[in-house]
Each structure stands twice: as C-alpha cells, then as structure tokens.
Amino acid sequence: ELEGVDDEGLDELDRKVLGAIISRYSSGPVGIEALAATLQEETDTLTDVVEPFLLQQGFLIRTSSGRRATATLSGDGESSAMTPFESPDFPTVTTARLILREVVAEDADDLLVFRGDPEVQKFNLMPMNDTREARGLIRTMQAWYVSRYAIQWGITLRGEDRVLGLCGLHDWNRKHRRASVGYDLARSRWGQGIATEAVRAVLRYGFEQWRLNRIEAIT
C-alpha cells in the first residue's frame, strides 16, 4: 500500500477535497474556484490532478450548479460511496451533441411526438393519444426517480431544448449493483447516431458515477 493512500485509493489531498465539500458545503454543490479558495490550493491542481480520479471512481460528480460529493467520510477519513438517487439534484449528462436532462411537464407535447407514434412504439407500449397521457408518464418518471426505481433522461440537442427521446436506467438492483438500459427516439431523428450517443453517455454514467457492475438491455 502506498504511503498516505487508503483502501479506496484516496490520498491526503483527495480526502481533503472530499472533506471540504462534505463538511463545509454540505456535500455541495460548490464552484471549483470557491473550493480552491477554501483549500488554499490552485484551481488547476484540483481540476487537473485531483478531480479526474474522483470523477472516474464516482466520489465526485459535476452538476450545472457545481461539484457534489457522492461519498461520505467516516471519522477516520475513510470514504463510503453514496447509492444512486441520493443526490438531491437530478443529474444532467452532456455529450458532444446532446444534453440529457430531467423531463418536466412542459415537455409533454414533445414527448407525445414519439410516444404517440405507432412506428416508434411498435415494440414498446401502446401509443399515447394526447398530452394528458404524456403528462401522466412524466409524473410516473418523476415518481420512479424519487422511489429509486429508475432514472429517465430526456434527450435534447445542444441549442435546441426540445425532448427528442428518452434514455435511462431502470430496475436498479442495489445488492448486485446492476441495472437495465432502455431508450426511444422520435422517428424524424432515426439514422443520425443520436440514440447511440445517448446510450453510450448513459452507460458511462452508470459505470462511472453509480459504479454499477453490469448494465443489461432487453432487445
């Protein structure tokens, strides 16, 4: 074992960063400049040296509001990872072209475009008939997140904040750290690589942020 490195692979500066976010900022969010000032460290040191490992190992996540710790520290400074859904903010996932975000009631019309399309829903659920049903699904997805059953992101293009499809993780198994992935996408957007890009981002999120052992898909 390396001197100063614990069983989780955290060194003194890693623990110092996590400890500050947890104790000084109630696990976050906190901006990187404020965190650097609190720790009296260079911002570049945190972003280039500390953050990459903490992000990769799932101890830290970036949100639109700042950095959040996804772990708690015991009295001896050891870390304990949080389980999925414990972050109070719905996470946003970004790629080169996409922003995956929470679906809200105002997205009902866009949701109906693909959820009401018989061709898109051929191997899924019965097509929806109106926005009332779409709003009902949105409420259901929000309940899934609160109950820790599933997380569903709305797929949007950067610069075009309209939901083109859904992609998410569901059937989360806490004991075995596994989940299932699924998606659907408006027919007008088929063949553009959007679903592939979204699924890859969600898989990466599941393995890196939730530290899942396995992600399954039913085809």
Image (cartoon, helix red, strand yellow):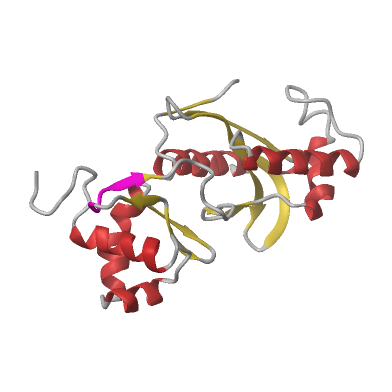
| Rendered position, 66 above or below 180 | below
- From this viewpoint, is residue 191 visible? no
* First to last magenta residue range: 76-80
Q: Residue at x 82, y 40 (%)?
A: 136
Residue 58 horizontal side relative to residue 92, left or right: left
- Quadrant location of the C terminus in the rendered image: top right
The quarter of the picture where residue 211 lies is top left
Q: Residue at x 31, y 56 (%)?
A: 52
Nearer the observer, 155 or 213 = 213
Q: Residue at x 64, y 42 (%)?
A: 146
- Quadrant location of the N terminus in the rendered image: top left
| Rendered position, 115 above or below 164 | above
- From this viewpoint, is residue 90 visible? yes
Magenta-colored stretch includes residue 182: no
The secondary structure making up most of the magenta span is: loop
Residue 2 horizontal side relative to residue 192, left or right: left
Residue 149 horizontal side relative to residue 61, left or right: right
Total count of labels: 0
Q: Position of residue 170 (x, y in %)?
A: 59, 32
Q: Residue furthest front?
A: 75
| Rendered position, 164 above or below 211 | below
Q: Position of residue 141 (x, y in %)?
A: 70, 40
The quarter of the picture where residue 162 lies is bottom right
